[in-house]
Amino acid sequence: MKASYVFGTVLIAALAGAVWGADPAPKDGPGWTGLTEPEELIEAREALMVEMERIMRPLDSYTIGEPASPDELRSIAQTVSQMMLAIPHLFPPTTNLYDPNVPIPKTLALPAIWKNWDAFEKMAEASHEQAEKITTMTTPDQLKAGALALRATCDACHAVN
């Protein structure tokens, strides 16, 4: 799980560097992926979501009785917590490309995200905070309840339509 933690940390550092080193006004050209290549940004966020689902499997399995190392579960939660900090930044308005009338939409992210941006950010923050709570949990009952609560925060966001 250390690799997942490193991946999450590197992703956050890269995003922070992009924000701090950014020009004050958007321009066409390299580095303005949300403007110049929204499909690539959509692909990146989809890859991050798929990876987050993959690394959360042990947490989800633990909630139905599969054994797992508490240290591994806390490490997973730490990684998810960091990834959730990045999620809202991967949804600039230029990636609002969902089209229900095409067989394969460019994105599965629904327009509701951009319609109620504050709610979207709050849901991402709730997931981040819940994952952070898991990192300090020690008992099996706490870890199970924490994992269920984390999954609930994810499901709540994905249920918005």
Image (tube, helix red, strand yellow):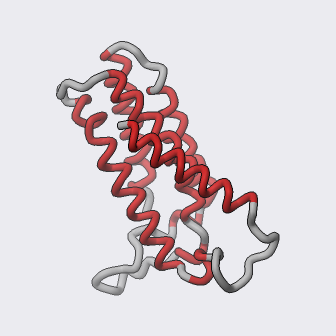
Residue at the right extreme, as displayed = 24
Above or below residue 158? Residue 111 is below
Above or below residue 1? Residue 73 is above
User: From the viewer's perspective, is 103 left or right of 137?
Assistant: left
For the N terminus, the image quarter is top left
User: From the viewer's perspective, is 17 left or right of 6?
Assistant: right
- Frontmost residue, 121 versus 57: 57
Residue shown at 45% from the left, 48% from the top: 7
- Frontmost residue, 58 versus 97: 58
Residue shown at 33% from the left, 86% from the top: 102
Residue at the top extreme, as displayed = 139
Residue shown at 75% from the left, 62% from the top: 21
For the C terminus, the image quarter is bottom left
User: From the viewer's perspective, is 72 left or right of 156?
Assistant: left
Q: In which quarter of the image is residue 104?
A: bottom left
Q: Position of residue 51 (x, y in %)?
A: 35, 53
Q: Where is residue 137 in the image (x, y as percent from the top left)?
A: 43, 19
Above or below residue 138? Residue 132 is below
The tally of labels here is: 0
Residue shown at 52% from the left, 75% from the top: 96
Q: Quadrant of residue 18?
A: bottom right
User: From the viewer's perspective, is 107 left or right of 62?
Assistant: right
Q: Position of residue 10 (x, y in %)?
A: 53, 50
Q: Quadrant of residue 70?
A: top left
Q: Position of residue 135 (x, y in %)?
A: 46, 26
